[in-house]
Image (tube, helix red, strand yellow):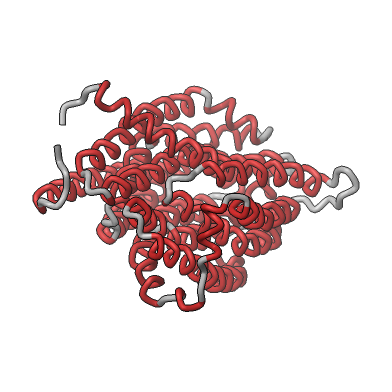
Amino acid sequence: MAYRLNTYLPFYKRNLNVALPIVFTQLGGAIVQLVDTLMVGQLGTVPLASISFASSVFIIGFIFSIGILMGLTPLVGMAYVQHHRARTTELFQNSLTLATLSALFTCGLLYGTTYLMPYMGQDKAVVECAIPYFHSLTLSLVPFLYFFAIKQFMEGMGNTWVAMVITIVSNVINIILNYALIFGKWGFPELGVLGAGVSTLISRLIMPILFVVAMRMRNVWWDYFRAFRWRLFSRKRLWELVKVGAPIAAHMLLEVLAFALSAIMVGWLGATPQAGHQIAQNMSHLTYMIVLGIGSATTVRVSHQIGVRDLRAARMAGNASMHLCLVYNAIAGTLLIVFRHEIAGAFSSDPAVIDIGGQLLIMAGIFQVSDGLQTVGAGVLRGLTDVRIVMVYAFIAYLCINLPCSYLLGFVFGLGAVGVWGGFIFGLSIAALLFHFRRRKMFRRLEQSGRYLIV
């Protein structure tokens, strides 16, 4: 399909209209994590390394839990544009059941992981500092999953603004409490690293409450709650959500697992490289949140167009998101490389940490474009509910290519933390290519089916 700017302009506008609130929502969480790191970094290298370690372990359970709920968005998107109100309500109600089951399972698993932390090859001081913070993060997962289920439901209907406002309010509360509880300001106890965890817990408790209040203010949203009935609890709908959500969770989990295991590898090198890793991870996470928002919006846009059987519009919506991410990630990668020392210096005053952090930011800058393209490619495939093959491709890219390359470059070739991060250049590039060819194949298959509008 030849590129014509005037043809794509409406798609850029529509995609951004859906994407921007999601981007701000995603950025909100990343900014809070960034503030956590900046504030805890003032306490020293060991506290900074401890939140890096705790976050790297927690993120595995966190991503699994939210990933399994992400199947709700394309399913609701298709049902909503087809005006199947009863089906939309059933999906919403059963997603809250799934959130409950996911919270119970994941929190139990995460608490059990606490007993394994001393055996993960980390400094003893880092582990002792990390565990209380980790417990607070684990508890915060329960209210967050209820918020996330409602958020995915609303996004499926094309409303992304309410979640953005709630996230901003929650983040402001989190940052204020961070300052008060980490440093013991305004009469609050000085809790250090634990203060960052308690702040996260309190702010996440508020999020689902605010969402319910917001929905109560609009009858068109509250009617979905009022339509809840015991008979709508359905194993069939739960299984439908799991069938789409589990492969999405597996894909996200495999990518995050690669980052988490790389953090553990870097931890083998000592607290200083791990602190540098935390700086680079925070910045790459921050830039990733924007493309993740665009990818999530792409899922909504593609699912809506597929729901009304407009294949051409679905394809162009996906292409438009690819163009947006290509431009954004090229700029973001350049900025990370050019300002690497200034960025690292904002997190730590330790020259050794600044040096290693700057080197890792170069690696993060290099893989920006690949990371953006693979994220949006996955978003298109989710909109088509073609999620199982994405999981397989993610396994190949992250576990079979990324991690072995990280280990070989870092420890066999002796490049240390830089080598560990170098593995992501290979893994993310392979993922981007695999998702690209799968996306083209799926659109050709749908076109040949004769059930969609293609002109």
- In the picture, measured across the screen, residue 248 lies left or right of residue 191, that is left
Q: Nearer the viewer, residue 187 or 58?
A: 187
Specify the quadrant of the image occupied by residue 366.
top left
Q: Position of residue 308 (x, y in %)?
A: 26, 48
Q: Nearer the viewer, residue 55 or 320?
A: 320
- In the picture, measured across the screen, residue 135 lies left or right of residue 451, that is right
Q: Nearer the viewer, residue 152 or 48?
A: 152
In the image, what residue occupies the spot 45% across and 74% down? 232
- In the picture, measured across the screen, residue 396 lies left or right of residue 114, that is left
Q: Is residue 454 above or below residue 394?
A: above
In the image, what residue occupies the spot 67% across and 43% down? 169
Residue farthest toward the right in the current orientation of the protein = 187
Q: Position of residue 210 (x, y in %)?
A: 65, 52
Q: Position of residue 188 (x, y in %)?
A: 86, 50
How many badges with numbers are in the image?
A: 0
Task: Quarter of the image for the C terminus: give it.
Answer: top left
Task: Quarter of the image for the N terminus: give it.
Answer: top left
Q: Nearer the viewer, residue 93 or 427?
A: 93
- In the picture, measured across the screen, residue 299 lies left or right of residue 192, that is left
Question: Does the image show residue 302?
Answer: yes
Q: Position of residue 25 (x, y in %)?
A: 54, 43
In the image, what residue occupies the spot 63% across and 30% down? 345
In the image, what residue occupies the spot 36% across and 27% down? 327
Question: Does the image show residue 127?
Answer: no
Specify the quadrant of the image occupied by residue 19.
top left
